[in-house]
Amino acid sequence: MCALRRLFSYATQNQVRTGCLCVCRRKFSVDFVPNLDPSNFKPQKVLILTKLSRYEFEKRRHPELTERELETRLRSRGSDYNMLLYHHYIHKGVENTVNSVFTAAGIETKVVYRFDYSDPNIEWADAIVTTGGDGTFLLAASRVLDRNKPLIGFNSDPMRSKGKLCLPQKYSVDVREAIDKLLKGKFRWTFRSRIRVTLIGDNIYKPPVELHDQQLLHPEYRYLDIDMQLRTMEKEVPPCSESGLARRVLPVLALNEVFIGECVSARVSYLELSFDGSKGIKQKCSGLIASTGTGSTSWTYNVNKLTEQNMEEILTIVKEETGFKIRDSDPLFVRKITNKFNEMLISDAEVPRMVYTIRDQLVSSPTRSECFKPRGLARSIAVKSRCFDASLVIDGGLSFTFNDGTRALLEIYEEDSLRTVTLYEDPTEVSFKH
């Protein structure tokens, strides 16, 4: 095995097991605590990562403007200044309430924006709490490398954000009840699987690109403001002893999905794929999506779901071909079957496997044995790029160059899972069989 891969020294299962990311130099703590009783959750220090609201972002972007000048500037761009301010105050209200309730419980807190969301602050805390939406939660998760450090999210604007990663929306209003349940152990731990990405080849230390629309609309995605490892080039990269090529384990883990494909969607992506050690097969498609169970409710779901129109047409064909009496014109029946199929696309967030989708697969081989199924499950995925101008994108926010010859290894490891909570007496996450 390549000496540059992440090395772990394993003691007994009840002891701390430490390791380091070779080249990245980031430390991992993968302590597996034998006692997972929620009643033992007694944090002394909580780090609150809060979203930078759009209003705050604009204030930082134009520090030279007075409030009236900022309002004029925003209105000239077609932005609703009053609505920005309104949602800013809603967000701040939730943030302040979360902070005050933890403080009243005798817990030391520290509120930080993404600029100060650093390793020392993360290590200082017993738990990480986010106030924002799914974007803030994803940003927080990307840097929590310790499986035993809980991450808990409060949706600070539930009227606009319908995210699935934070606590249920009612706790945005009743923050005290949520924190009371947490401190009394009225929850279960949910260990969400994450994807570890290893890049092999040239230019793998080239700084990634943040997707431009998210820089403006969702500044919480701006990873480069907080992680110097992502911003700098590695001057001396020792080669992998197996291939002679440089190998890099990315210092971020994907909680939702990894996308690999050409940057221009109209261009065909040419990839060589291998799932769980199978023989590599070259595929032409519109890109590969590898999602976790957490991400199976998001992009992967919407790519693969059937509409009621599709289902009605399929049922009509089955009716005509078989002669069976199928209620293909009954909208309630069609909706029921459609929902049943779509539910099958959702995977358990804790299962250590990826749901992969080969988008718009082009079948050029005369024998179908030369093609993978367009959708399936895998614990490890190996990808070799044959693309012209491609990227590997982590959780929709961080894009790494992935051109011809570069290889990527996507893997699920138990020690990479993210510890989150599911409060009792609330609708729990539903898992469906594939």
Image (cartoon, grey):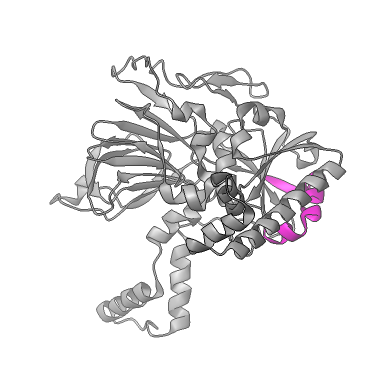
Q: Is residue 275 left or right of residue 416?
A: left
Residue at x 77% of width, y 45% of height = 99
Quarter of the view holding residue 390: top left
Q: Is residue 189 left or right of residue 292?
A: right
Q: Is residue 248 above or below residue 48?
A: above
Residue at x 43% of width, y 39% of height = 379
Q: In what quadrant of the picture does the C terminus appear?
A: bottom left
Quarter of the view holding residue 281: top left
Q: Is residue 392 left or right of residue 295?
A: left
Residue at x 60% of width, y 39% of height = 114
Residue 64 at x, y percent in the picture = 57, 45
Q: Is residue 378 left or right of residue 92?
A: left
Residue 181 in the magenta stretch? The answer is yes
Residue 259 at x, y percent in the picture = 38, 45
Magenta part of the chain: 168-189
Residue 276 in the magenta stretch? The answer is no
Residue 330 at x, y percent in the picture = 43, 85
The front one of 94 and 237 is: 94
